[in-house]
Each structure stands twice: as structure tokens, then as C-alpha cells.
Amino acid sequence: MCRSALLFAAFILLMPNAARGQGGSANEKASVYEGWRQYSVHCARCHGQDVLGNPVAANLLVSVAPGGPTAEQEAFLTVVLQGRPERGMPAFEEAMTSEQMEAVYVYVKGRAEKRVPPGRPKDPG
């Protein structure tokens, strides 16, 4: 086997599971996928596709990262539920179920912690 093939094989074996699109329980994968779906419908327009940030709204990669103002699930869900009307963010209390909001948190948290790569997650179904 040539040297570049060996290096590539070593890279793949050492790459974190999430970056390969693997790892995590089936339940977590389903939550990430559903969170991505809900984020794409309700959040991406303002917060950026794939949670990559946008000058229009808060950068969720920073907000949900450890130490961020909505790093904890309860704080995140409160903001999503009630909105921040003074900053132009609508409340999603009537637009999303609590399960959908929780799935968005799982997806955004995974993106902030670099466990979920950009792009469409693999459909677990």
C-alpha cells in the first residue's frame, strides 16, 4: 500500500465518529436529524444555514457553546419559546412543539460542539 493510502486510512480511523456521520445512539441521530429539519424551516433564514452564523441574528455557534448565554437547554428553550421581540426574534410558542424545540437544541448544540458536521445529517429512518 502506498504511503498516501496509509495516511488516508489512518486519518479515517482516527477521525471522530460524529465527523464521519457515525456515533451516537439511534435516538440521538433521530433528534439531530429532526433538529436539522426544524432548524432549516424555522431558524436558518435568520441564524444562517447549517448554524454557520448570519449578521442578521445571534450566532448560535457562540450562543450555545459552553459558557454561552444559551448553552444550557433550559435557557435556549426559553428564548425559542418566548422569543426576543426587542431584538426582532419572534416567539415560537405556537409554531413549534416542545419536542421540535428540543430537537433543534440537540442539533444546534451538536454543531456548536463540533460533533455534528455542516450539511444534511443522515436520515436515521
Image (cartoon, rainbow, N blue to C red):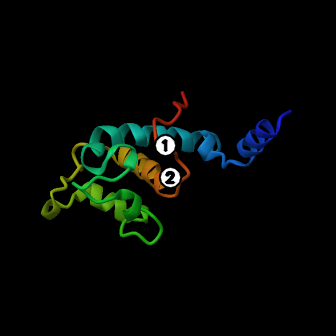
**Mark 1: which amino acid?**
Val
Side of 78 relative to 5 (left or right): left
Quadrant placement of the N terminus: top right
- Name the residue nearer the viewer: 74 or 119: 119
Secondary-structure class at tag 2: helix
Which residue position is annotated with label 1?
Answer: 32
Q: CA distance from mark 2 to mark 1?
A: 8 Å
Sequence-earlier tag: 2 or 1:
1
Residue 60 location, x and y as percent?
Answer: 36, 57
Side of 117 relative to 98 (left or right): right
| Mark 1 crowd level (few <14, some 14–19, many ≥20, 10 Å Cα) | many
Residue 43 location, x and y as percent?
Answer: 29, 46
For residue 36, which quarter of the picture?
top left
Quadrant placement of the C terminus: top right
Circles 2 and 1: CB atoms closer than 8 Å: yes
Q: Residue at x 63, y 40 (%)?
A: 22
Residue 41 location, x and y as percent?
Answer: 30, 37
Side of 96 relative to 107 (left or right): left
Please identify the residue farthest to the bottom as the structure is shown.
67
Side of 117 relative to 99 (left or right): right
- Name the residue nearer the viewer: 27 or 70: 70
Vertical placement of 123 versus 105: above or below? above
- Name the residue nearer the viewer: 79 or 57: 57
User: How many numbered marks have been drawn onto this rendered protein structure?
Assistant: 2
**Mark 2: which amino acid?**
Gly
Q: Residue at x 44, y 72 (%)?
A: 67
Secondary-structure class at tag 1: helix
Which residue position is annotated with label 2?
Answer: 110
